[in-house]
Image: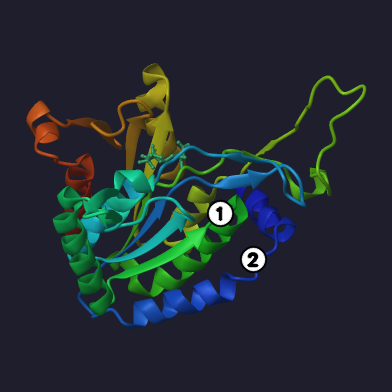
Protein backbone atom coordinates (compact mmCIF):
# COMPACT_ATOMS: atom_id res chain seq x y z
CA UNK A 1 0.00 0.00 0.00
CA UNK A 2 2.73 2.44 0.99
CA UNK A 3 4.74 1.53 -2.10
CA UNK A 4 1.72 2.17 -4.29
CA UNK A 5 1.45 5.60 -2.68
CA UNK A 6 5.04 6.34 -3.56
CA UNK A 7 4.61 5.22 -7.19
CA UNK A 8 1.50 7.37 -7.46
CA UNK A 9 3.37 10.34 -6.00
CA UNK A 10 5.99 10.16 -8.76
CA UNK A 11 3.31 9.83 -11.45
CA UNK A 12 1.33 12.79 -10.12
CA UNK A 13 4.44 14.89 -9.60
CA UNK A 14 6.58 14.45 -12.72
CA UNK A 15 10.36 14.76 -12.56
CA UNK A 16 11.78 18.30 -12.54
CA UNK A 17 13.55 19.37 -15.75
CA UNK A 18 16.80 19.54 -13.75
CA UNK A 19 16.79 15.82 -12.91
CA UNK A 20 19.00 14.61 -15.78
CA UNK A 21 21.56 17.26 -14.88
CA UNK A 22 21.61 16.01 -11.27
CA UNK A 23 21.85 12.43 -12.48
CA UNK A 24 24.86 13.26 -14.68
CA UNK A 25 26.62 15.19 -11.93
CA UNK A 26 26.16 12.32 -9.48
CA UNK A 27 27.42 9.78 -12.01
CA UNK A 28 30.51 11.85 -12.81
CA UNK A 29 31.19 12.41 -9.10
CA UNK A 30 30.95 8.70 -8.29
CA UNK A 31 33.23 7.82 -11.25
CA UNK A 32 35.87 10.15 -9.82
CA UNK A 33 36.02 8.38 -6.46
CA UNK A 34 38.93 6.06 -5.69
CA UNK A 35 38.05 2.43 -4.96
CA UNK A 36 38.58 2.68 -1.20
CA UNK A 37 36.68 5.91 -0.52
CA UNK A 38 33.23 5.76 1.11
CA UNK A 39 30.50 8.08 -0.09
CA UNK A 40 27.84 9.73 2.06
CA UNK A 41 24.69 11.52 1.01
CA UNK A 42 23.99 14.29 3.52
CA UNK A 43 20.57 15.90 3.17
CA UNK A 44 20.04 19.29 4.74
CA UNK A 45 17.55 22.13 5.11
CA UNK A 46 13.77 22.00 4.89
CA UNK A 47 11.48 21.08 2.00
CA UNK A 48 8.79 23.45 0.75
CA UNK A 49 5.28 22.48 -0.37
CA UNK A 50 3.32 24.87 -2.61
CA UNK A 51 -0.28 25.90 -1.92
CA UNK A 52 -0.95 26.90 -5.53
CA UNK A 53 0.32 25.54 -8.87
CA UNK A 54 1.28 29.08 -9.85
CA UNK A 55 2.91 29.40 -6.47
CA UNK A 56 2.49 32.58 -4.46
CA UNK A 57 2.03 30.89 -1.07
CA UNK A 58 3.76 27.85 0.35
CA UNK A 59 4.29 25.88 3.56
CA UNK A 60 7.86 25.48 4.68
CA UNK A 61 9.68 23.13 7.02
CA UNK A 62 11.96 24.51 9.66
CA UNK A 63 15.72 23.97 9.29
CA UNK A 64 18.60 26.41 9.06
CA UNK A 65 20.77 23.69 7.57
CA UNK A 66 23.45 23.84 10.23
CA UNK A 67 23.25 20.14 11.15
CA UNK A 68 23.69 19.10 7.52
CA UNK A 69 26.39 21.63 6.62
CA UNK A 70 28.47 20.97 9.74
CA UNK A 71 28.11 17.19 9.33
CA UNK A 72 29.15 17.39 5.67
CA UNK A 73 32.38 19.10 6.77
CA UNK A 74 33.18 16.44 9.36
CA UNK A 75 32.50 13.64 6.85
CA UNK A 76 34.79 15.33 4.30
CA UNK A 77 37.52 15.73 6.91
CA UNK A 78 37.18 12.05 7.83
CA UNK A 79 37.91 11.13 4.19
CA UNK A 80 34.39 10.52 2.89
CA UNK A 81 33.17 11.87 -0.42
CA UNK A 82 30.05 13.91 0.31
CA UNK A 83 27.01 14.53 -1.85
CA UNK A 84 25.35 17.46 -0.11
CA UNK A 85 21.67 17.75 -1.02
CA UNK A 86 20.65 21.07 0.49
CA UNK A 87 17.80 23.53 0.47
CA UNK A 88 18.76 26.39 -1.79
CA UNK A 89 20.11 29.34 0.27
CA UNK A 90 20.43 27.29 3.48
CA UNK A 91 23.82 26.91 5.17
CA UNK A 92 26.64 25.26 3.24
CA UNK A 93 29.76 23.38 4.35
CA UNK A 94 32.95 25.39 4.85
CA UNK A 95 31.25 28.77 4.35
CA UNK A 96 28.43 28.40 6.88
CA UNK A 97 30.10 30.77 9.36
CA UNK A 98 30.06 33.57 6.83
CA UNK A 99 26.38 33.66 6.05
CA UNK A 100 23.87 35.99 7.63
CA UNK A 101 23.61 39.78 7.73
CA UNK A 102 26.61 41.44 6.09
CA UNK A 103 27.01 43.70 9.12
CA UNK A 104 28.10 40.57 11.04
CA UNK A 105 30.92 40.02 8.58
CA UNK A 106 32.26 43.46 7.75
CA UNK A 107 33.41 46.49 9.62
CA UNK A 108 33.94 50.06 8.43
CA UNK A 109 37.52 51.26 8.60
CA UNK A 110 38.31 54.97 8.45
CA UNK A 111 41.45 55.90 6.55
CA UNK A 112 42.09 59.67 6.64
CA UNK A 113 38.95 61.37 5.44
CA UNK A 114 37.56 58.34 3.60
CA UNK A 115 36.26 55.00 4.88
CA UNK A 116 35.96 51.51 3.45
CA UNK A 117 34.31 48.24 4.38
CA UNK A 118 36.59 45.35 5.36
CA UNK A 119 36.07 41.83 6.61
CA UNK A 120 36.25 41.77 10.43
CA UNK A 121 39.72 40.85 11.74
CA UNK A 122 38.26 38.11 13.94
CA UNK A 123 36.91 36.37 10.83
CA UNK A 124 39.92 36.71 8.52
CA UNK A 125 41.82 33.61 9.70
CA UNK A 126 38.65 31.57 9.75
CA UNK A 127 37.78 32.66 6.22
CA UNK A 128 41.24 31.75 4.90
CA UNK A 129 41.20 28.33 6.52
CA UNK A 130 37.63 27.65 5.30
CA UNK A 131 38.59 28.57 1.75
CA UNK A 132 41.67 26.34 1.97
CA UNK A 133 39.49 23.44 3.17
CA UNK A 134 37.00 24.04 0.39
CA UNK A 135 39.73 24.15 -2.26
CA UNK A 136 41.27 20.97 -0.87
CA UNK A 137 37.91 19.16 -1.01
CA UNK A 138 37.28 20.37 -4.54
CA UNK A 139 40.71 19.25 -5.74
CA UNK A 140 40.12 15.79 -4.29
CA UNK A 141 36.56 15.69 -5.72
CA UNK A 142 35.21 15.09 -2.25
CA UNK A 143 32.24 17.44 -2.28
CA UNK A 144 29.28 17.75 -4.62
CA UNK A 145 26.60 20.29 -3.63
CA UNK A 146 23.12 19.93 -5.13
CA UNK A 147 20.37 22.41 -4.25
CA UNK A 148 16.62 21.72 -4.03
CA UNK A 149 13.66 23.81 -2.93
CA UNK A 150 10.41 21.85 -3.34
CA UNK A 151 9.48 18.57 -1.68
CA UNK A 152 9.03 17.01 -5.14
CA UNK A 153 12.54 18.03 -6.21
CA UNK A 154 13.96 16.65 -2.98
CA UNK A 155 12.27 13.27 -3.43
CA UNK A 156 13.15 12.90 -7.12
CA UNK A 157 16.77 13.81 -6.37
CA UNK A 158 16.92 11.43 -3.39
CA UNK A 159 15.71 8.57 -5.60
CA UNK A 160 18.15 9.43 -8.40
CA UNK A 161 21.12 9.80 -6.05
CA UNK A 162 20.26 6.51 -4.33
CA UNK A 163 20.13 4.78 -7.70
CA UNK A 164 23.51 6.31 -8.59
CA UNK A 165 25.04 5.13 -5.31
CA UNK A 166 23.70 1.59 -5.62
CA UNK A 167 26.88 0.39 -7.38
CA UNK A 168 28.90 1.30 -4.26
CA UNK A 169 26.81 -1.16 -2.23
CA UNK A 170 27.82 -0.98 1.45
CA UNK A 171 30.35 1.82 0.87
CA UNK A 172 27.39 4.21 0.68
CA UNK A 173 25.94 5.94 3.71
CA UNK A 174 22.72 7.98 3.84
CA UNK A 175 22.57 10.70 6.50
CA UNK A 176 19.11 12.19 6.24
CA UNK A 177 19.19 15.42 8.24
CA UNK A 178 16.79 17.40 6.02
CA UNK A 179 13.46 18.34 7.55
CA UNK A 180 11.02 16.77 5.13
CA UNK A 181 7.35 17.79 4.90
CA UNK A 182 4.97 15.21 6.34
CA UNK A 183 1.97 16.66 4.48
CA UNK A 184 1.40 18.12 1.05
CA UNK A 185 -1.46 19.14 -1.23
CA UNK A 186 -1.74 16.57 -4.04
CA UNK A 187 -1.48 18.10 -7.52
CA UNK A 188 -5.10 17.27 -8.39
CA UNK A 189 -6.39 19.12 -5.29
CA UNK A 190 -4.20 22.17 -5.71
CA UNK A 191 -5.55 25.51 -6.88
CA UNK A 192 -4.24 26.47 -10.33
CA UNK A 193 -3.97 30.16 -9.46
CA UNK A 194 -3.40 32.28 -6.38
CA UNK A 195 -6.02 31.45 -3.74
CA UNK A 196 -8.35 34.42 -3.53
CA UNK A 197 -9.41 36.27 -0.41
CA UNK A 198 -12.28 38.72 -0.39
CA UNK A 199 -15.94 39.19 0.38
CA UNK A 200 -17.64 36.30 2.13
CA UNK A 201 -14.39 34.43 2.90
CA UNK A 202 -13.83 34.37 6.64
CA UNK A 203 -11.44 31.42 6.71
CA UNK A 204 -9.12 29.41 4.51
CA UNK A 205 -9.45 25.65 4.72
CA UNK A 206 -6.69 23.53 3.28
CA UNK A 207 -6.83 19.80 2.89
CA UNK A 208 -3.42 18.14 2.97
CA UNK A 209 -2.44 14.51 2.58
CA UNK A 210 0.44 12.59 4.13
CA UNK A 211 3.58 12.39 2.04
CA UNK A 212 4.29 8.72 1.22
CA UNK A 213 6.96 7.22 3.47
CA UNK A 214 9.97 7.24 1.17
CA UNK A 215 12.29 5.95 3.85
CA UNK A 216 10.73 2.53 3.38
CA UNK A 217 11.49 2.68 -0.35
CA UNK A 218 15.05 3.76 0.32
CA UNK A 219 15.69 0.93 2.76
CA UNK A 220 13.93 -1.80 0.78
CA UNK A 221 14.72 -1.01 -2.83
CA UNK A 222 16.70 2.11 -3.59
CA UNK A 223 19.69 1.44 -1.29
CA UNK A 224 19.28 -1.99 0.32
CA UNK A 225 22.99 -2.47 1.10
CA UNK A 226 23.81 1.02 2.36
CA UNK A 227 23.90 2.24 5.95
CA UNK A 228 20.86 4.45 6.46
CA UNK A 229 20.65 7.00 9.25
CA UNK A 230 17.57 9.16 9.66
CA UNK A 231 16.80 12.01 12.05
CA UNK A 232 13.67 12.45 14.12
CA UNK A 233 12.66 15.94 15.13
CA UNK A 234 10.07 16.61 17.81
CA UNK A 235 9.12 19.50 20.07
CA UNK A 236 7.58 17.35 22.85
CA UNK A 237 10.25 15.49 24.80
CA UNK A 238 7.71 12.98 26.11
CA UNK A 239 7.24 11.41 22.69
CA UNK A 240 10.69 11.82 21.13
CA UNK A 241 12.22 8.42 21.88
CA UNK A 242 9.00 6.54 21.32
CA UNK A 243 8.61 8.15 17.88
CA UNK A 244 12.25 7.44 16.99
CA UNK A 245 11.83 3.79 18.02
CA UNK A 246 8.64 3.53 15.98
CA UNK A 247 10.47 4.86 12.89
CA UNK A 248 13.29 2.34 13.37
CA UNK A 249 10.82 -0.48 13.78
CA UNK A 250 8.71 0.64 10.83
CA UNK A 251 11.50 1.08 8.29
CA UNK A 252 13.98 -1.40 9.65
CA UNK A 253 17.05 0.74 9.00
CA UNK A 254 20.13 1.03 11.22
CA UNK A 255 19.93 4.23 13.27
CA UNK A 256 17.60 7.09 14.16
CA UNK A 257 19.14 10.19 15.67
CA UNK A 258 16.48 11.89 17.76
CA UNK A 259 16.55 15.56 18.69
CA UNK A 260 14.32 18.25 20.14
CA UNK A 261 13.99 21.57 18.37
CA UNK A 262 15.13 23.62 21.37
CA UNK A 263 18.13 21.52 22.40
CA UNK A 264 19.25 20.13 19.02
CA UNK A 265 22.61 21.88 19.14
CA UNK A 266 23.70 20.29 22.42
CA UNK A 267 21.80 17.00 22.86
CA UNK A 268 20.85 14.13 20.60
CA UNK A 269 19.86 10.51 21.23
CA UNK A 270 21.15 7.59 19.16
CA UNK A 271 18.31 5.11 18.89
CA UNK A 272 19.15 1.60 17.67
CA UNK A 273 16.94 -1.49 17.90
CA UNK A 274 17.73 -2.37 21.51
CA UNK A 275 19.20 0.73 23.07
CA UNK A 276 19.17 4.49 23.38
CA UNK A 277 22.36 6.44 23.93
CA UNK A 278 22.18 10.13 24.75
CA UNK A 279 24.97 12.46 23.72
CA UNK A 280 25.18 15.81 25.51
CA UNK A 281 27.78 18.49 24.93
CA UNK A 282 29.42 19.50 28.21
CA UNK A 283 29.87 23.10 29.34
CA UNK A 284 33.55 22.75 28.44
CA UNK A 285 32.70 21.49 24.95
CA UNK A 286 30.45 24.49 24.43
CA UNK A 287 33.09 26.91 25.77
CA UNK A 288 35.70 25.40 23.44
CA UNK A 289 33.47 25.70 20.40
CA UNK A 290 33.07 21.92 19.98
CA UNK A 291 30.12 21.12 17.75
CA UNK A 292 27.83 18.18 18.42
CA UNK A 293 28.08 17.17 14.73
CA UNK A 294 31.76 16.32 15.34
CA UNK A 295 30.65 13.58 17.79
CA UNK A 296 27.62 12.53 15.77
CA UNK A 297 29.65 12.01 12.60
CA UNK A 298 32.36 10.02 14.47
CA UNK A 299 29.67 7.69 15.84
CA UNK A 300 28.11 7.25 12.40
CA UNK A 301 31.47 6.43 10.82
CA UNK A 302 32.14 3.90 13.59
CA UNK A 303 28.79 2.27 12.89
CA UNK A 304 29.51 2.22 9.14
CA UNK A 305 32.85 0.46 9.77
CA UNK A 306 31.25 -2.06 12.13
CA UNK A 307 28.48 -2.82 9.65
CA UNK A 308 31.01 -3.43 6.90
CA UNK A 309 33.07 -5.78 9.09
CA UNK A 310 30.17 -8.10 9.79
C1 LIG B 1 16.54 16.96 12.04
O1 LIG B 1 16.00 16.52 13.00
C2 LIG B 1 17.72 17.94 12.13
O2 LIG B 1 18.54 17.58 13.19
C3 LIG B 1 17.26 19.43 12.28
C4 LIG B 1 18.55 20.28 12.26
C5 LIG B 1 16.34 19.82 11.13
C6 LIG B 1 16.54 19.65 13.61
P1 LIG B 1 19.20 22.76 11.70
O3 LIG B 1 19.10 22.49 10.22
O4 LIG B 1 18.28 21.64 12.43
O5 LIG B 1 20.62 22.58 12.19
O6 LIG B 1 18.59 24.07 12.07
N1 LIG B 1 16.15 16.60 10.79
C7 LIG B 1 15.11 15.66 10.48
C8 LIG B 1 13.76 16.23 10.56
C9 LIG B 1 12.67 15.38 9.93
O7 LIG B 1 11.91 15.91 9.17
N2 LIG B 1 12.59 14.10 10.22
C10 LIG B 1 11.42 13.32 9.82
C11 LIG B 1 10.57 13.18 11.06
O8 LIG B 1 10.94 13.69 12.13
C12 LIG B 1 11.88 11.99 9.33
S1 LIG B 1 12.71 12.11 7.78
O9 LIG B 1 9.50 12.57 10.95
Q: Is mark 2 within 8 Å of ligand 1?
A: no
Quadrant showing the C terminus:
bottom left
Count of numbered badges drawn on the protein:
2
Question: Which sits in the foreground, 252 or 65?
Answer: 65
**In the figure, is residue 71 to the left or right of 165?**
left
Q: Residue 156 placed where, x, y %?
A: 57, 61
Query: Which secondary structure, mark 1?
Result: loop
Q: Residue at x 30, y 27 (%)?
A: 263
Q: Residue at x 46, y 54 (%)?
A: 89
Q: Residue 13 placed where, x, y %?
A: 70, 57
**In the figure, is residue 14 to the left or right of 235?**
right
Q: According to the image, label 2 marks what residue?
A: 16
Q: Which mark is residue 149?
A: 1
Which quadrant of the figure has residue 81?
bottom left
Query: Which secondary structure, mark 2?
Result: loop
**In the figure, is residue 111 to the left or right of 41?**
left
Q: Residue furthest right?
A: 200
Nearer the camera: disc 1 or disc 2: 1
Residue 85 in the image: above or below residue 163:
above
Q: Residue furthest top?
A: 238
Q: Residue 264 placed where, x, y %?
A: 31, 32
Residue 41 in the image: above or below residue 288:
below
For the question of whether residue 37 can be seen, the reply is no
Amino acid sequence: MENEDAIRFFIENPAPSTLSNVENKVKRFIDLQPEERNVVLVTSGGTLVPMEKNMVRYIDNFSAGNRGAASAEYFCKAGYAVIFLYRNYSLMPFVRHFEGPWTNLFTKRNVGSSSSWEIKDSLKDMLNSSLEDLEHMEKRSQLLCLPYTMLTEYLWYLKTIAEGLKCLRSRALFYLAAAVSDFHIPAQDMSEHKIQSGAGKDKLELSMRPVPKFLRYLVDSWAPEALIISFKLETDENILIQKARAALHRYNHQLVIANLLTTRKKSVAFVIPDSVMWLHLSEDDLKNGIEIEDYIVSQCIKLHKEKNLT
